Amino acid sequence: MKKQNINRKHNFPDADLYQICIQSLKNAKRDLQLFEDYGYEESRMRTFFKLTDQFKDLPDDEELLGDQMLMTEKKYEASEKLKAAIRSLMMRVAMKYSNKSGRYRKFGTSKMGDMTDAQLIFCGRRVVRVARQQADFLDDVGINDNTIRRISEAGQRFENAVNIQQDRVANRDIAVESRVQKSNKLYEELIILCNIGKDIWSEKDPLKYEQYTIYESNNEQKKARKANMGA
């Protein structure tokens, strides 16, 4: 069963979430004695601040995507080097045999440009294996241990690059999910804190009440300010 994606509970950027949390905590610290009447004590505020402070240091998706793209570029470079090594060997094989012959076709490189990463890895292994089997027939066209080793080593480097790139993709998915979970936890705590703040000042001080009001968009904030000005 496919795992369901975790969605953000807030509509504004994480940077805005961090800033709103910090400012709301400052307001709550100012109003600490009033918050304590609701059972929301200083220790809980400190825990909230610690989580908020840790959140700002989490890598964002752009950073993780950039890292993933670097690994993809290295994988592409490694694949091109493997293909170049294979083509060099196959050119020598073609000098010895027709490219329509069974000995040539046995290498299985005819559709190398269309191969997936996994297929190219297997192709490299097959070329090494077949070249070693036919080494006695191909030494006169310069195919020897060094030629074959070049393909073997290029294939290993490409396979390593594929694995690293796949790890970066998985790490990005995990990190994004973790960031969403932590942002949701902050948002839930922020809502509790701000609801208390609004309840404290709802009939006492409109300005302080406004300080605990969360707007999901700039448009909502503009509308609220316009309404307040009209009042």
Image (spheres, rainbow, N blue to C red):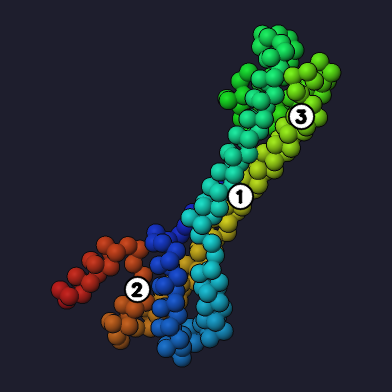
Query: Which quadrant is the N terminus positioned in?
Result: top right
The CA span between labels 3 and 1 is 31 Å
Q: Indicate whether 89 appears above or below 218.
A: above
Question: Is 181 placed left or right of 124 in the picture?
Answer: left
| SS at circle 1 | helix
Give how far across and how far down residue 173 sits, in percent: 57, 51
**Can you identify the residue that label 3 sits on?**
148
Give how far across and how far down residue 195 sits, in percent: 41, 75
Give the residue type that dot 3 points to.
Ile
**Mark 1 and mark 3 in contact (Cβ < 8 Å)?**
no
Sequence-earlier tag: 2 or 3: 3
Give how far across and how far down residue 69 sits, in percent: 53, 47
The CA span between labels 2 and 3 is 69 Å
**Can you identify the residue that label 1 sits on?**
168
Question: Is 216 placed left or right of 120 in the picture?
Answer: left
The CA span between labels 2 and 1 is 39 Å
Residue drawn 70% across and 41% down? 157
| SS at circle 2 | loop
User: Of 222 and 31, which appears nearest the observer?
Assistant: 222
Residue drawn 48% across and 83% down? 38
Residue 213, numbered circle = 2
Give the residue type that dot 2 points to.
Thr
